Image (cartoon, rainbow, N blue to C red):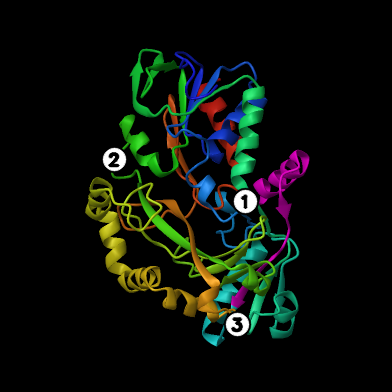
Amino acid sequence: MSGAATPVERADVAIVGGGIVGLATAKKLLAQRPELRIALIEKEAELATHQTGHNSGVVHAGLYYQPGSLKARLCREGKEEAERYIEEKGLPYERCGKLVVALDESELPRFQALKERATANGVPGLEEVGPERIREIEPHCLGIRALWSPGTGITDWRKVALAYAEDVRAAGATIETSRAATSITLRGAETVVGTSRGDLVVRKVIACAGLQADRVSAMTGEDGPDVPRIIPFRGDYYTLTPDARALVKGLIYPVNDPRFPFLGIHLTKRVDGEVLAGPNAVLAFRREGYRRSDLSLGDLREALAYPGFQKLARKFWRMGAMEMWRDLSKGAFLAELRRYVPDLRGDQLVFGPSGVRAQALGRDGALVDDFQLGGSDRVLHVRNAPSPAATSSLAIGRVLADEAISRFAL
C-alpha cells in the first residue's frame, strides 16, 4: 500500500520504521506467524532512505566485533543468509575482499588484537599477509602487514531492503509510507500508535526507528538514565574520478581503534563501479542531516546537553578535532588516503555522498558497541543497530521475531 492510500486503522502488530531492519523483522515474523496482520509504517515518502540508503554497501565478514557478542554472531549468520538471498533474487553482489592494512610498527599491537578477534569470530579465509602479497592484492597499496578477508563483499543494501519489502507485501502485510509515529499509548489490552495519518490500534509494537530510536522509546515512557541516547555522527565520502578507480581493486581499510565503533577513513569499491573514500565521523548538527549545512538547533542542543556526549567529548576531544579538520580540509582528507594509496591525487577526489550513523551513547559517555534490544510486554525497541546491521539484517530480524513471539505470546 502506498503512502497515499487510506491508512490502516487496526492490526495485530505495528512495526515502526521502514529501514532494512524493520523490513527484515516483518519478513521473519510473517515466516513464523503468517496469520498475523502486520502494518509497517515509515515516516518518509520512500522506504530505506536513511542508514540503509546511505551506507557504503559492504557485506561485512565479522572481523571487528567482540567475540560472543550479538554483532559477532548475527553478522556471521546474517552474512550467510544475505548472500543466499541476494543470489536467489539476482541482486548485485561481488565478493571483492578486504585488506586491513598496518602502515608501521606502532600499529602492530592493534593489528595483532584485531587478528585474534577475527580468528575468534571464525572469519573464513582470513590470511595475514606481508608487503609483497599486499601489492599482489592491491597493486597501489602500501603497508608492512595486512589482514586479507577474501570473503568480504559488496552489494546495494537499499535494493536488498526493497526486495524484502516486496516479500513482506506478498505475504499479506501492509506497508505505509509518509506515516510517522507521533505517540504510543497503552489502552487496556490495546496499544494505540498515534500517527500523522490517524491512529493505528494494535496489540503489540516493534520499533526499528534508527536515528529516532530513543525518541520512539520515550513515547512509551522508556527514557530513563539506563536507556542510551542516539547521537548522530555524519560521515562524508569523496568519490574517485573514473581515471583513478583502477587504483583500488576492492576494499582498503586502516587498522581500527578498538575504543570506537568507527572504522576510520577507507577506500571502498561499489557494485556500480564507483570507489568511495571515507567516511570521517563528526557530530551531525541535525539527526537526519546529510549536508554540512544541515542544522537543527533542537537536535544540536539536545546532543550537546546530554551528559554522555559531554563526557565523550572531554575524553576524546583531540580525535574529534582531527575528524572535524579532515571534514573541512580536502588536503587533510587526501593526506590520510595517500598514506595507503600514495598515487592518489587531489584532482581525483570529488566530494560525494554522506551518511548519518545512529550511534547509541550511554549517560556515562560509553559508546554502545553491540546491538541492543529492550522493551516491555507490549513494545519491543531496537535501541542500537548501526553497522553491520545491513549485513546482519535477516539474522536481527529472526532474533526480533523470536523475541516478539515469546515476549508478546503471539
Quarter holding the N terminus is: top right
The picture places residue 306, in percent across and down from the top left corner, at 25, 52
Amino acid type indicated by mark 2: Gly
Real-space CA distance between mark 2 and mark 1, rounded to the nearest whole angstrom: 29 Å
Q: Is residue 81 magenta?
A: yes
Q: Which residue is mark 1?
A: 75
Q: Nearer the viewer, mark 2 or mark 3?
A: 3
Amino acid type indicated by mark 1: Cys
Identify the residue at image location x=36%, y=34%. Answer: 216
Q: Which mark is residue 321?
A: none
Q: Which residue is mark 3?
A: 343
User: Given the current orientation, which residue lies at the most extreme bottom position?
Assistant: 105
Q: Quadrant of residue 104?
A: bottom right
Q: Is residue 15 magenta?
A: no
Question: In this rendering, is residue 205 above or below 103?
Answer: above
Question: In this rendering, is residue 126 above or below 396?
Answer: below
Which region is colored magenta? 75-101
Q: Are marks 2 and 1 in contact (CB under 8 Å)?
A: no
**Count of residue discs:** 3
Q: Nearer the viewer, mark 2 or mark 1?
A: 1
213 relative to 87 in the view: left or right: left
Which secondary structure lies at badge 3? loop
Identify the residue at image location x=58%, y=41%. Answer: 396
